[in-house]
Image: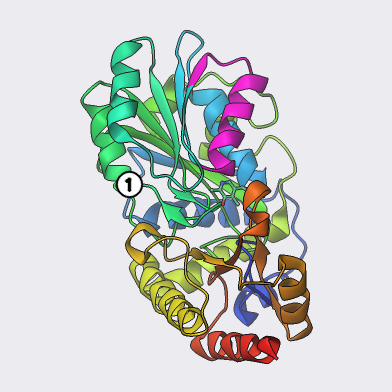
Amino acid sequence: MLLLNPGPVTLSARVRNSLLQTDLCHRESEFFDLQDEARARLLQIYGLDAAQWAAVLMTGSGTAAVESMVAALVPENGKLLVVENGVYGERITQIATQYRIAHTVAKHEWMQAPDVARIAAALDADRSITHVAAIHHETTTGRLNDLRALASVCRERGVRLLLDGVSSFGAEAIDFADTTLAAVAATANKCLHGVPGAAFVIVRRDALAVAASRTYYLDLGRLARLQDQRNTPFTPSVHAYYALVEALRELADEGGWVARHARYAALAEQARAGLAARGMASVLPPEQSSVVLRAYRLPAGVAYPQLHDALKARGFVIYAGQGGLSAELFRISTMGDIHAADIERLLQSFDGLAK
Ligand SMILES: *Cc1c(COP(=O)(O)O)cnc(C)c1O
């Protein structure tokens, strides 16, 4: 079965086999070697200086990393503006609400790009806002939000940016040189091609120095402090760390994030062109989409469950639209061990359906 859903991904044999390594106690030096390698390799992907940035690992899915970041980095007397244009932006608002973090929302329709002028006006109207939280790749629609425009609006006002990069880290450009960017939350099992269970926040050390977490288990400051000391507060998902490290080695061997971006871009274009030729248009133009996932209009008269089941019978798991979009679209991700021949077979499977 090939997974074309946005994580977990189809594993390479190399990553799958890494799960079979020896059992490890997480209080032994062998585990801390593994943890150190994962942390160092995560920084290397975007060439980050370990004196300025920390990769903080945790056990959980991508949401754990987003929650850890938001709960720690908005100070007690700070205020968060959440940019929403899909499910994942809305999730950050729910996290802020749950922790009673002072926040306001720049709400957009799911199909809309963030309105940067409106966000600038909202920041100007409320000078107590200290942080903006945004989604880089809004997986709800496949839209790649314009980070540069958002960051410049924040920079001009001395506001810091907290980024959900869960479905873009490792495959899309992220400008870490921009000092407005305080942290990026992501996970092992999307563009990095690991298994679910390990997540992380890439955080500036100056932001970490003043972090004060509202959560116990996901306390970003404690996790970072102990990991810097070759320690860990709790039992980590050791096997997920094995897979993460092997996936990071594989990524480096394949040419890093730029090569991964190019690989996804080619697969996404192959899928887009093939579906367009079969009368299924992509929802967003390619230049507004990530290379990671694209959303397509369901063919007339075909309900999603029908399409899903027929493709699953042919060996492909695709993904539904979320919420109100479930009746209109389906999504195809090209993350994981997916190749051009797989996309070709997928497209041929669509031909079989029409009859
Ligand atoms: C997948 C995803 C998440 C986290 O989902 P989990 O199920 O917790 O891994 C968060 N944000 C975005 C943009 C995502 O695509």
How far across and how far down the image is residue 57, in percent?
57, 44
How far across and how far down the image is residue 143, in percent?
44, 54
Q: Residue shown at 30%/34% (left/top)?
A: 116
How far across and how far down the image is residue 153, in percent?
25, 30
- Tell me which amino acid carries mark 1: Asp
Q: Name the quarter where the C terminus is drawn.
A: bottom right
Left or right position of 60 against 230: right
Q: Residue shown at 53%/34% (left/top)?
A: 224
Give the farthest residue toward the left: 156
Q: Is residue 166 magenta?
A: no
Magenta stretch in the rendered image: 86-104
Work out whether residue 81 or residue 141 is closer to the camera in this orientation and state it: 141
Q: Residue shown at 63%/42% (left/top)?
A: 63
Eyeballing the image, is 268 above or below 165? below
Work out whether residue 218 or residue 310 is closer to the camera in this orientation and state it: 310
Residue 1 in sight here: no
Q: Name the quarter where the N terminus is drawn.
A: bottom right
Eyeballing the image, is 35 above or below 123? below
Q: Which residue is mark 1?
A: 146
Q: Main secondary structure of the magenta part?
A: helix
